[in-house]
Image (cartoon, grey):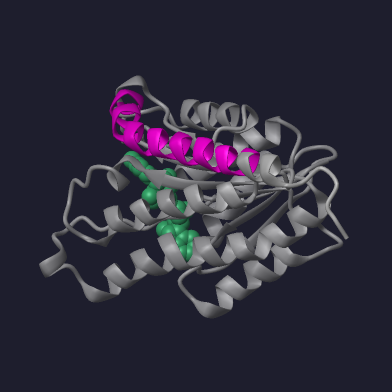
Amino acid sequence: MPTALVTGASRGLGSAFASRLARDGHDLVLVDRDQTGLERVATFLRGPGRSVEVLVADLSDEKGLAAVQTRLEAKDRPVDLLVNNAGVSGETEFTVADIAKLQAEIDVNITALMRLTRAALPGMIDRHRGAVINVASFAGYLAGKGDAYAASKAWVLSFTDTVSASLEGTGVRMIALVAGQLRNAMFPAPPDASRDGLDPSAVVDTCLADLAKGRTLSVPGWRYRAVVDVLELPRRTLRTAARLARKGRDQAGTLRKPAHPQS
Ligand SMILES: NC(=O)c1ccc[n+]([C@@H]2O[C@H](COP(=O)([O-])OP(=O)(O)OC[C@H]3O[C@@H](n4cnc5c(N)ncnc54)[C@H](OP(=O)(O)O)[C@@H]3O)[C@@H](O)[C@H]2O)c1
């Protein structure tokens, strides 16, 4: 059975990822700082022949982060899919935001995501298989508030773009999920759960389908997709032009090489 490690798995989108991956036949490692919430999700998802580990860790804390890195590096219990889902968002303007809250946005949304990815990739590359899903946000394109959250999610998009390109030919894939406003996805949903926004389960389904197609960007919801398609157009065009230029240079280099080099 393949194993998936999901961060921020005690509720929200993380629990939706855990639920779908369990249905798909994955063993799970669920990470969160909320032990009670994690145990609730784990109890719900445990089933015959399926292992569900619970790893309580605060990803903004060095010790917690190191524990998850160690789990990802364990050669005898390989992780095939890393879902970097845990995220922190502030609700205030930057100039009045609490500095600890701003720092947590950087620590969880950027530092933890980068370090867990760094821990997971070498093993995946050695095994020639594996994938990383980085949960970004539409705010990474168009910020609603002036705190550090949108900038941190823009970093996730840029990071995924860069690293996924370097993974070409390794058998390992990486995708950024551009999540729009989500419906409350408490696990199980409380009676007062919000009904507005995208259905987290549908978001997960779209993301996993896009990953299977080899895409590096997943944008669930047609409204979000329409905007992102337009915003991504210049970058896609530039990338295609760069690829064609590289190919042209390689071909020219091959033609210039003498068929029988003189010794
Ligand atoms: N909700 C949206 O509308 C929306 C839109 C776009 C993108 N996103 C992104 O989607 C992802 C999931 O969002 P969500 O709405 O499902 O979030 P959520 O309900 O707030 O859940 C976030 C999860 O991350 C965990 N987490 C936060 N800080 C942590 C830390 N220091 N260490 C370990 N775990 C930590 C939380 O644990 P605790 O329970 O301990 O807090 C929680 O389980 C995030 O990356 C978010 O930025 C969400």
* 166, above or below 17, in the image: below
Extreme residue toward the top, this view: 222
Q: Which residue is at 28% across, 69% downward?
A: 101
Q: What residue is at 28 percent from the left and 53 percent from the top?
A: 150
Whether residue 134 sits left or right of residue 29 in the image: it is left
Residue closest to the eye, 190 or 244: 244
Pick out the residue farthest to the front.
262
Pinpoint residue 94: horizontal percent, then vertical percent.
16, 64
Magenta extent: 224-251
> Magenta region's main secondary structure?
helix
Q: Nearer the viewer, residue 217 or 145?
A: 217
Query: Percent x, y for residue 221?
Result: 37, 24
Compared with 204, 152 (above or below) is below
Q: Please say whether residue 33 is visible from this viewpoint.
A: no
Q: Position of residue 61 (x, y in %)?
A: 49, 76
Q: Residue at x 29, y 75 (%)?
A: 100
Left or right, 235 with reference to 90: right
Q: Is residue 247 shown in magenta?
A: yes
